[in-house]
Image (spheres, grey):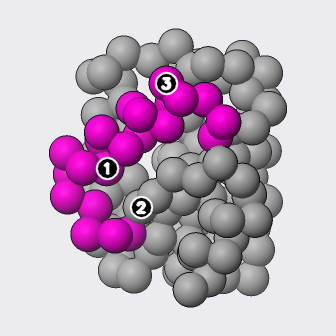
Amino acid sequence: MAYQIEWEQWGAVTYFTGDVSFDDLRESECEIFLSAAKAKPRFVISVFLRANEVPCSEGEYQELTSLRYGGYASKGGIRFAVVTSSTLMKNRFIADFERFGSDNSAAVFPSFVEAVNWVRS
């Protein structure tokens, strides 16, 4: 498992490290979504600063985005932030957020502090 989920008072932070597979991404999203039904989080932050490039196809990224929007957006008011220094990952997440019309509920940041400040604003 290339991730660890930490639950905060009002949300969840997932830290990805090393080689992250599509299955790791999907599994972490499902785990958070299932827990979200009980915890009612206001934010989810996915941190990829210590992860290698994630070898996912465009279709797999779209599936992940669908999981996020289907799960989190249906709960209302949940913000989703991605933290990455990878231009490729940043561009893929931004493209998927735009494709699903994120209505400012999702964003990508270069630092964890910026992501935390945004989800709390």
Which comes before the other along the chain, label 2 or label 3? 3
Residue drawn 58% across the image and 74% down it: 118
- Distance from disc 2 to disc 3, alpha carbons, whole Å, reads 17 Å
Q: Which dot, 2 or 3, sits closer to the camera?
A: 3
Residue 105 position within the rendered picture, expressed as x and y whole percent measured from the top left? 38, 69
| Amino acid type at image mark 1 | Phe
Q: Which one is nearer the viewer's eye here, 116 or 2?
A: 116
Q: Report which residue position mark 2 lands on.
A: 106
Q: Which one is nearer the viewer's eye here, 110 or 106?
A: 110
- Distance from disc 1 to disc 2, alpha carbons, whole Å, reads 7 Å
Asked which secondary structure carries label 1, the reply is: helix
Residue drawn 61% across the image and 19% down it: 53
Label 2, residues with CA under 10 Å away: few <14, some 14-19, many ≥20: many
Q: Report which residue position mark 1 lands on.
A: 97
Q: Quarter holding the N terminus?
A: top right
| Amino acid type at image mark 2 | Ala
Is residue 19 one of those drawn in magenta? no
Q: Which residues are magenta?
A: 84-105
Which comes before the other along the chain, label 1 or label 2? 1
Q: Which mark is residue 88?
A: 3
